[in-house]
Amino acid sequence: MKRASLIVVTALFLLSAVLSGCSSGGTNSSGGGDSNAKKPVKLSLWTFQDLHKNYYEKTADLWNKSHPDEPIELTVDTYPNAEMHNKLLIALQSGVGAPDLADININYFQNFLKGDIQLVELNDIIEPEKDKFIQSRFDIYSKDGKYYGIDFHVGATVVYYNKELLDKAGVNPDAIKTWDDYIAAGKKVVAATGKPMTAFEVTNQRPFWPMIVQRGSDYLDKNGDVILDNETNIKTLQAMKDMIDKDKIAIPMPGGNTGAEEFFTFMNKGGAASLIMPMWYMSRFLAYMPDLKGKMVVRPMPVWEQGDVRSAGMGGTGTAVTKQSKNQEVAKQFLAYAKLTKESGIRIWQELQFDPIRWDVWDSPELQKPDPYFGNEKVFNVLLELKDEIKSPNMGELSSAAQDLVNSNVMFKALKDQSQTPEQALKSAADELRKQK
């Protein structure tokens, strides 16, 4: 009898404990852990760049510290560039296997905006902040007024001058306003130092592409039609060829492009007095050309004629949320946290050396810090001066093909082996492109 009573008392005690626990909101009174702790939302992200992976993983840690009630568990996978984009396209088309978020290179982005778009519209996170950003960097990832990607950087094209070489020639970079000024200054540099004023890519498309965009031209028009062989483009490429052959201030780039080791070595030794490249190339100077520390200054692009703008936004990575994500709202909020906040704009500069698309951070103390590599100047003052002059290219279904043709044929044949005139090279590529439409 006594044993039966003991069992009943024990049962009542346990029931009371359970009820007590329920009434107090689920607090674990045993001291064995917080039963209220929210389970993290699992998010997956694909990228093609290890630097981006590091940035996202750090951003996820910061998110979890600032959003303790909305924790996430982010898994980032890195793949080779072309492989990742093929894998992503197949996953989205087949309806299975896509991540929650993906970095999509600007060169491939239009492939993901064809037919039934499998990316999530981002207008609700972009619209409230849009006036603080460079609008053209949203436009390049949009279709029919809907935004599908958010970039890391503006990619504003500037001129990096080697001031040590300019000083020997008595050239003031601030006096260079037009491309005619640039050519005249280049002749002084060649005469005084024996070094060319610049080098042009011949297995890639810079500075040809930004040079035509600053004149209001492009490879495609706003409707996606081919204009690669228009008069402006022919004149621009001819002017570049003249800088090599006639004015003798430029050379075909050693190694072919600005990512080649041969070019890094050439430039690091003071091989050329200037380089026309986007702002994101600052990180390459810091990483691969240490001997130029303190010698380089950044200035706007010269103009061809009155009315031209002094920069063009080049390159880019549009990060997107896929429709296969089961946590689209959380993925969008994380993306906004990673790329749209003021804090993220500052981190993108500090950690990636990219010019952030949020312009109202360009005058923050972190971005206004004088840079010893670039002559102790405040580099972002140049961008503040150019804020309303940064055009981005027109993007269409033929964008990727157009760039491939310019990279592989046009620049090499017109500037390096000179087997075609600039007009012939552009017309040949444009004809090939029109066949693909």
Image (tube, rainbow, N blue to C red):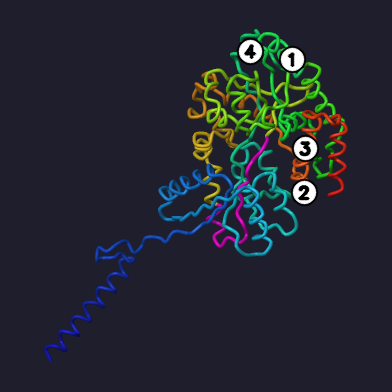
Q: Which of pointers 4 and 3 lies earlier in the amino acid sequence?
A: 4
Residue 181, which numbered label? 1
The residue wearing badge 3 is 406
**Circles 4, 2 touching at the beta carbon (< 8 Å):** no
State how far apart marks 4 and 1 are (Cα). Answer: 13 Å
Instruction: Tell me if 434 is positioned left or right of 34 in this view.
Output: right
**Circles 4, 3 touching at the beta carbon (< 8 Å):** no
Q: Residue at x 87, y 37 (%)?
A: 427
Judged from the image, the secondary structure of the residue bearing numbered disc 3 is: helix
Res. 250 image quadrant: top right
**Circles 4, 1 touching at the beta carbon (< 8 Å):** no
Q: Which of pointers 4 and 1 lies earlier in the amino acid sequence?
A: 4
Q: Residues within 10 Å of mark 4 (few under 14, many from 20)?
A: many
Q: Which of pointers 4 and 2 lies earlier in the amino acid sequence?
A: 4
Instruction: Tell me the quarter of the image containing the N terminus.
Output: bottom left
Judged from the image, the secondary structure of the residue bearing numbered disc 2 is: loop
Residue 329 in magenta? yes
Amino acid type at circle 4 is Leu
Residues in magenta, as a range: 314-332
Q: Which of label 3 and label 1 is nearer to you?
A: 3
Res. 358 image quadrant: top right
**Circles 3, 1 touching at the beta carbon (< 8 Å):** no
The residue wearing badge 2 is 397
The residue wearing badge 4 is 166
- Residue 90 percent coordinates (x, y): 67, 59
128 vs 253: above or below: below
For the residue pair 363 and 410, the one nearer the viewer reads as 410
